[in-house]
Amino acid sequence: MASFNAQDGAFFFSGSSILTRDGGGLASPPDLAGEFPGSVTFRVSDLSGGTVACVDVPENAALPPGWKSEEVRRILPLVLEDSAGPLRAFHFAQWRRDSAFCGTCGGPNRDCEDGTSRFCPACGRVEFPRITPAIIVLIENGSGEILLARNRKFAPGMYSLVAGFTEAGETLEQTVIREVREEVGLELADIRYEASQPWPFPASLMVGFSARYSGGEIRPDGVEIEDAGWFGPAGLPKLPGPGSVGRLLIDRWLGGQLRHTHSQK
Ligand SMILES: [Zn+2]
């Protein structure tokens, strides 16, 4: 795979996909934007003093010969290994589409030149990309098992860790407690931070925790969660693919490499 260095290139995004040329890596020459009528080129700061170019291509645009389209989600493990640049650019491209107008006066927003924000020339309001925190938690029961739950929206047979969005006014730890209580009816102790991951689908920051089961019987909420149970290493169901922080936590647990271990009390 070619490098993600975008100094002389641009990321081409279309909806939830990245457009690349055969054998060309993730960034392409910016002047190729001319091959996509209706596309818009803008710049995003790389958080170290520079900017990278992005081209937002209309979702229904035809692919010229030699180009291919790939869901950004699917290249995630590759992106995370190298640099967060493409993920940041993708987050921006999506937010840009959703921030065409000022939330205060309704005037059209413009891009700031430094690639960190947009502003409204009519009233001066500056808008930054929205980032929505969400938690995901690996719960150990003290008998060598973890809690896995099946969301109704998952692919058939797949289970993962309990996850959910932070509500206004909550700490991340409070989100962990509330989500687990709501979705599976369990109580927790020893909630510890493990890892985090930008998850721009469309605007999340996933924050991974581990915790110890401390009480309650498993009761799937029947709305989001249709099944949940304790699973040991030998009997794991189908899990999310590599590249998600949920899978990272499960893999760390399997390898005895969680940052925090939770012995039963
Ligand atoms: Zn305004």
Image (spheres, helix red, strand yellow):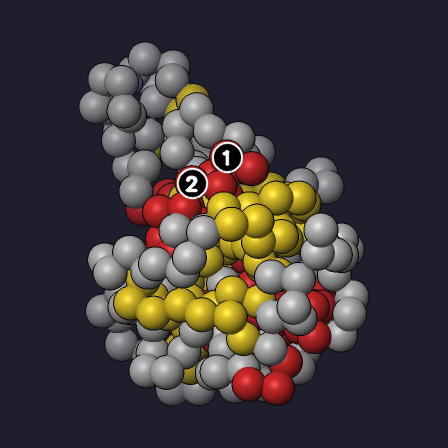
Kind of residue sitting beneath label 2: Arg
Q: Looking at the picture, does residue 24 appear above or below residue 7?
A: below
Image point (63%, 80%), residue name: 233
The local crowd at label 2, few if under 14, some if 14 to 19, many if 20 or more residues have their Cα within 10 Å, is some
Within the image, what quadrant is residue 228 found in? bottom left
Q: Which residue is mark 2?
A: 178
Q: Secondary structure at mark 1?
A: helix
Q: Looking at the picture, does residue 202 appear above or below residue 78?
A: above
- Res. 120 visible in picture: yes
Q: Nearer the viewer, residue 180 or 80?
A: 180
Q: Which labelled disc corresponds to residue 174? A: 1
Circles 2 and 1: CB distance less than 8 Å?
A: yes
Q: Secondary structure at mark 2?
A: helix
- Where residue 253 appears, as percent x and y from the top left, is 69, 68
Kind of residue sitting beneath label 1: Gln
Q: Looking at the picture, does residue 230 appear above or below residue 121?
A: below
- Marks 2 and 1 sit apart, C-alpha to C-alpha, by 6 Å
